[in-house]
Image: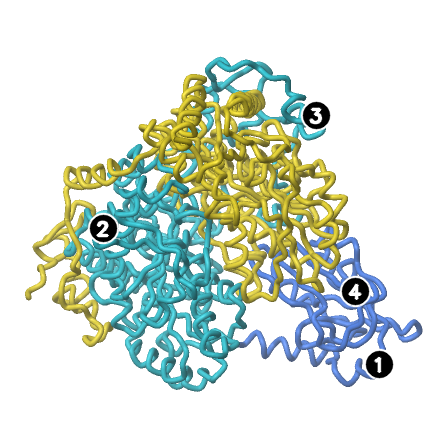
Chain colours: A cyan, B blue, C yellow
């Protein structure tokens, strides 16, 4: 960390407030002023926003600049959160998204005024169709989980149309938590599918689980261990033979973009987190986008409206989808996230998109090769873009995954994803992405190896880490027992 | 680890301390269970008057990063809940068999105490085998 | 065809090239990158390049995208009076500059609090602003947008009333929000009943009272989609026994209008875009949700709380996480994971810069200017203002002619004159919605009046 620890963390913006300070100026009102009572009855007005701040622009800039320095970010170095795909965020994407003609277009303008936007969305759909190998893609969902809900609602509607929406969604025990949550909000009960010793779906287990009541399997490809489901075609066949659907959580598309396509695997529905594979910045937790690709069978149920091209080359929003599940969100999805993603796709091109997967997988396997003698590898099947270790070698010294993660911060790295997937006890899930140069990977591996040595020789040092971050370990139990969820003015 | 002799235990790690004179069982989670959970931050309990069958969901208990369901080891009516846990859930950690109790139930069938539950010795054996997994 | 050799190709976003690749393959112990993909069966391998354009340089990229942007006709070169859930308010220049700081822009969700205090503290501040503005107790870290925030509010309310299945939603709630709710709840056994409006454009209280029996929640929007400010007390009185949900789609209105929390509402959800976020064709925006304290453990989404570190320093952390999907999985309060954190950060900056006085002044100027336009229009022959209820900064205009034709005439005058209601409601072909903010000048407002007057005259001929 470049920032030194200090005795105090920064004040809240509310604690900077002083009567009379201003951080804005508006032009003088240039229309005749009407009495407030003539516009809005007093009972519907507030006299003031009690306790709101009074600060200057300088206060605001200093405050947020200081806050920013307490974060680590992908621009500062490797950020190896497994399943999160923290890759480089090119700045041309930011510049394009700020083009005034995009940034100040309004979502309820008639089609003829926003031909540029519609054309852009149409091109993005064409590109995603080619990447997915699927006939249609909805750009409306604004996050991965939103895409999952969209997809499972489509499955429900399709099955209901044919007489029976069925009752269950199968989900492997290695899945992201959003999968069961999304399936539940789409109206289904969850049945968990046990992984086999490779961490993948066992065909015989699946075959027994796919009853007439099963609507779909939600599966992550490659799974959260980074292992590709080599029998994906057979998985699809088993489901299709029983009239069920195959949903693919595309969170890990970075592992195979341009190498293989979900449509060719028999997938009926996939979402892609554009803020992962297609480099739109995570922004501390969003915004994202979660477009959903579908097979022919699900096309009638896509959210409305869709973007269509007329013979004359003009574009329009098409609401005429009588079997659509409906609208997933107001307006047109996270348009300006979609702009960034298409900018990235164009910058990459065909070979670049493929090279993403190639180098992401090489980088992850390089880390795997360098660390496997220091850390336990609970599943040794070949992995693609991420590798999952455990703390098994370190627990004898009473040092655990959490400690290793915290110690990494002292070496200047953001920790990997920890304690996930749930099928690995003490999981350390590392995804370097293609963005990392070899020297950064080496520095990371050397830090991990040094920590493994510390676990043996100076376990207390690791157990009490981090030591050099702006704050040290937090009392999370206190935060949850007596929640303080807002600033309160001193009385 | 302590396992009081005067209580009975369920496989889901709840204890019942039965007052035969009153016909009332005091229920909480065992010392082993609170250690496994770590810092307890919230306990969700039923309302007084709730009728429960043995095995019914009684509520839930949360640590910072996990949530576990609580099951009623016996059948009966909830006659009291430990209001103190709302403010001080950590009592479950510090005194699970005492101030960290959760509910009191008027047992509808006291024979369940013997038929459904383990004694202290059996429970200790049970957690030995479970910990081995 | 032969595929490019990963040993010799390169890309500016992917540092490792031929020398690195060779060295790394040696360490991994394979002779080619292709071998690393052996677990993908040949039958599903693409074995060709994707048929997509590129790779483009920044020069080409900029040229193509700017070309597309130039095909739009927008508020950049027109006077825009478009609202309807997306409002053009001024965003002070320093906000976008600060948002581009890599430490905010390129950080992940703050799962590791020791290295994420910047994001966490900002969310805590954002949550505080939401509470102050809405008069409620607990705000979350953000939801996708106003429409999905309403969905989450309906689902939260339903969890509080286990035996009821009916929710009342005012027909004057944004049409897209109502559509989105219907999509979300379609398989959950919830019945949506819509309640119409009275002549003044406010919720029809008699209809509301009649429908409230047996409903678990009532959702109203204020200012509503017709621009009319609702009477929260009257709505509350007509909906006993329900969870009251207030929807705020024009968030700057909270600078002058009384907060829903002060009128017994239980949940306030809405769209924070009006806090200076560009309209950007509808997204990304930022949904907010603020609730009474008693509902906090049932909330969807992330919450940041205050605590201390081992050295006793005040610090912030994601908390009450057991509500969420990564822990409670199929029984979580919501499936949301990624939210709109960066937009919430922009909102925090906006609310802080404008502050107590600025938020009021933006609201007052927007209201005064809307009032000026409304007064001037009421003097124009042929213009009718169909709703008599109080207005904040948006209102319905009716002429004797189809709105689409009138608006096309205004477009010739470089005015984006409003949003036709025909697409949203039956029998309103001549009605459209116009919004005014502090960005409009008197000259633009006068030009609007003159252009509309001329358009009506032209149509008469």
Residue nearer the viewer, C364 or A2: C364
Tell me the quarter of the picture where residue C305 sits.
Answer: top right
The reply to whether the C-beta atoms of the residues labelled 1 and 3 are less than 8 Å apart is: no
In this figure, which residue is indicated by the disc labeled 4? B103
Image quadrant where one finds the N terminus of chain A: top left
Crowding around mark 3 (Cα neighbors within 10 Å: few <14, some 14 to 19, many 20+) is few
Q: Residue at x 79, y 55 (%)?
A: B83
Q: CA distance from mark 1 to mark 3?
A: 63 Å
User: Regarding mark 1 in the picture, which secondary structure is present there?
Assistant: loop
Q: Are marks 2 and 3 on the same chain?
A: yes
In this figure, which residue is indicated by the disc labeled 2? A345
Residue nearer the viewer, A321 or A392: A321
The chain carrying label 4 is B
Q: Are marks 4 and 2 on the same chain?
A: no
Residue A188 drawn at (x, y percent): 53, 71
In this figure, which residue is indicated by the disc labeled 3? A42
Crowding around mark 2 (Cα neighbors within 10 Å: few <14, some 14 to 19, many 20+) is many
In this figure, which residue is indicated by the disc labeled 1? B109
The reply to whether the C-beta atoms of the residues labelled 2 and 3 are less than 8 Å apart is: no
Residue C434 drawn at (x, y percent): 48, 33
Image quadrant where one finds the C terminus of chain A: top right
Q: Earlier in the sequence, mark 2 or mark 3?
A: 3
Q: Is residue C118 visible?
A: no
Q: Earlier in the sequence, mark 4 or mark 1?
A: 4
The reply to whether the C-beta atoms of the residues labelled 3 and 4 are less than 8 Å apart is: no
């Amino acid at each position: 960390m470049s920032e030194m620890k200090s005795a105090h963390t920064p004040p809240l913006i509310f604690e900077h407030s002083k009567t009379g300070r201003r951080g804005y100026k508006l032009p003088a009102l240039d229309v005749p002023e009407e009495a407030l009572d003539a516009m809005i009855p007093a009972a519907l007005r507030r006299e003031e926003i009690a306790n709101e701040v009074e600060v200057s622009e300088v206060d605001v800039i200093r405050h947020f600049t200081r806050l920013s320095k307490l974060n680590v970010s992908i621009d500062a170095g490797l950020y190896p959160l497994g399943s999160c795909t923290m890759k480089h965020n090119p700045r041309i994407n930011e510049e394009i998204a700020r083009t005034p003609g995009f940034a100040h277009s309004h979502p309820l303008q008639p089609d003829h005024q926003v031909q540029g936007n519609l054309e852009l969305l149409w091109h993005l759909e064409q590109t995603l169709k080619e990447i997915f190998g699927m006939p249609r893609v909805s750009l409306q969902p604004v996050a991965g989980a939103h895409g999952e809900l969209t997809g499972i609602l489509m499955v429900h509607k399709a099955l209901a149309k044919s007489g029976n929406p069925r009752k269950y969604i199968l989900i492997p025990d290695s899945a992201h938590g959003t999968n069961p949550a999304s399936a539940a909000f789409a109206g289904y009960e969850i049945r968990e599918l046990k992984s086999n010793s490779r961490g993948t779906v066992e065909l015989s287990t699946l075959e027994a689980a796919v009853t007439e009541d099963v609507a779909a399997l939600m599966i992550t490809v490659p799974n959260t261990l980074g292992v590709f489901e080599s029998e994906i075609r057979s998985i699809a066949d088993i489901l299709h033979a029983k009239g069920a659907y195959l949903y693919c959580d595309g969170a890990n598309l970075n592992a195979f973009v341009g190498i293989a396509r979900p449509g060719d695997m028999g997938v009926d529905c996939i979402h892609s987190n554009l803020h992962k594979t297609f480099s739109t910045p995570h922004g501390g937790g969003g915004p994202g986008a979660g477009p959903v690709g579908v097979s022919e069978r699900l096309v009638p149920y896509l959210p409305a409206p869709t973007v269509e091209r007329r013979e004359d080359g003009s574009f329009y929003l098409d609401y005429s989808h009588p079997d659509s599940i409906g609208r997933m969100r107001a307006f047109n999805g996270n348009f300006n996230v979609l702009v960034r993603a298409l900018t990235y796709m164009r910058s990459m091109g065909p070979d670049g998109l493929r090279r993403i997967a190639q180098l992401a997988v090489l980088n992850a396997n390089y880390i795997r090769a360098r660390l496997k003698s220091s850390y336990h590898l609970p599943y040794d099947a070949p992995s693609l873009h991420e590798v999952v270790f455990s703390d098994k070698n370190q627990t004898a010294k009473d040092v655990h995954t959490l400690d290793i993660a915290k110690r990494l911060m002292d070496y200047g790295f953001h920790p990997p994803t920890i304690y996930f997937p749930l099928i690995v006890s003490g999981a350390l899930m590392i995804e370097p992405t293609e963005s990392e140069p070899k020297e950064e990977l080496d520095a990371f591996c050397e830090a991990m190896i040094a920590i493994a040595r510390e676990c043996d020789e100076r376990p207390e040092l690791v157990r009490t880490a981090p030591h050099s971050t702006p704050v040290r370990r937090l009392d999370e139990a206190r935060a949850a027992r007596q929640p303080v969820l807002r600033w309160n003015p001193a009385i | 680890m302590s396992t009081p002799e005067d209580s009975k235990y369920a496989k889901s790690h709840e204890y019942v301390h039965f007052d035969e004179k009153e016909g009332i069982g005091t229920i909480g989670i065992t010392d082993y269970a609170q250690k496994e959970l770590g810092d307890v931050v919230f306990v969700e309990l039923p309302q007084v008057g709730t009728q429960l069958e043995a095995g019914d969901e009684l509520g839930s208990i949360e640590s910072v990063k996990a949530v576990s369901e609580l099951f009623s080891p016996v059948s009966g009516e909830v006659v009291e809940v430990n209001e103190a846990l709302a403010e001080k859930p950590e009592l479950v950690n510090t005194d699970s068999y005492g101030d960290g109790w959760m509910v009191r139930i008027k047992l509808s069938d006291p024979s369940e105490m013997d038929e459904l539950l383990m004694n202290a010795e059996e429970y200790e054996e049970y957690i030995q085998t479970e910990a081995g997994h | 065809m032969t595929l490019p050799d990963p040993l010799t190709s390169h890309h500016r976003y992917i540092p490792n090239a031929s020398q690195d690749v060779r060295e790394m393959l040696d360490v991994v112990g394979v002779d080619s990158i292709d071998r690393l993909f052996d677990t993908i069966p040949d039958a599903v391998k693409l074995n060709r390049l994707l048929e997509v354009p590129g790779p483009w340089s920044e020069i080409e990229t900029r040229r193509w995208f700017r070309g597309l942007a130039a095909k739009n006709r927008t508020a950049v070169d027109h006077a825009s009076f478009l609202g309807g859930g997306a409002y053009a308010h001024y965003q002070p220049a320093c906000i976008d500059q600060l948002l581009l700081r890599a430490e905010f822009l390129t950080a992940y969700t703050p799962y590791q609090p020791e290295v994420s205090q910047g994001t966490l503290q900002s969310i805590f501040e954002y949550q505080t602003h939401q509470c102050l503005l809405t008069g409620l107790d607990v705000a979350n870290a953000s939801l996708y947008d106003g429409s999905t925030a309403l969905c989450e509010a309906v689902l939260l309310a339903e969890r509080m009333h286990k035996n009821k299945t009916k929710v009342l939603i005012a027909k004057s709630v944004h049409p897209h929000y109502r559509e989105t709710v219907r999509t979300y709840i379609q398989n959950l056994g919830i019945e949506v009943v819509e309640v119409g409006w009275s002549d003044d454009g406010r919720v029809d209280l008699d209809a509301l009272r009649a429908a409230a029996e047996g409903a678990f929640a009532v959702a109203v929007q204020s200012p509503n989609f017709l621009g009319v400010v609702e009477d929260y007390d009257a709505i509350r009185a007509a909906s006993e026994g329900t969870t009251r949900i207030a929807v705020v789609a024009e968030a700057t209105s909270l600078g002058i209008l009384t907060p829903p929390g002060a009128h017994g509402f239980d949940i306030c959800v809405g769209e924070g875009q009006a806090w200076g976020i560009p309209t950007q064709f509808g997204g990304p925006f930022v949904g907010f949700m603020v609730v009474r304290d008693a509902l906090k453990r049932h909330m969807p989404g992330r919450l940041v709380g205050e605590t201390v570190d081992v050295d006793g320093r005040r610090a912030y952390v994601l908390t009450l996480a057991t509500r969420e999907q990564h822990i409670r999985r199929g029984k979580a309060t919501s499936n949301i994971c990624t939210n709109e954190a960066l937009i919430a950060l922009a909102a925090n900056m906006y609310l802080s810069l404008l502050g107590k006085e600025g938020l009021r002044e933006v609201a007052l100027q927007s209201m005064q200017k809307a009032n000026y336009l409304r007064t001037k229009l009421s003097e124009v022959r042929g213009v009718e203002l169909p709703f008599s209820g109080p207005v904040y900064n948006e209102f319905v205009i009716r002429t004797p002619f189809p709105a689409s034709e009138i608006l096309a005439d205004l477009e010739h005058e470089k005015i984006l004159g409003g949003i036709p209601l025909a697409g949203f409601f039956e029998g309103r072909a001549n009605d459209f919605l116009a919004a005014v903010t502090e960005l409009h000048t008197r000259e633009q407002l006068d030009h609007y009046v003159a252009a509309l007057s001329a358009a009506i005259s032209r149509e008469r001929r």
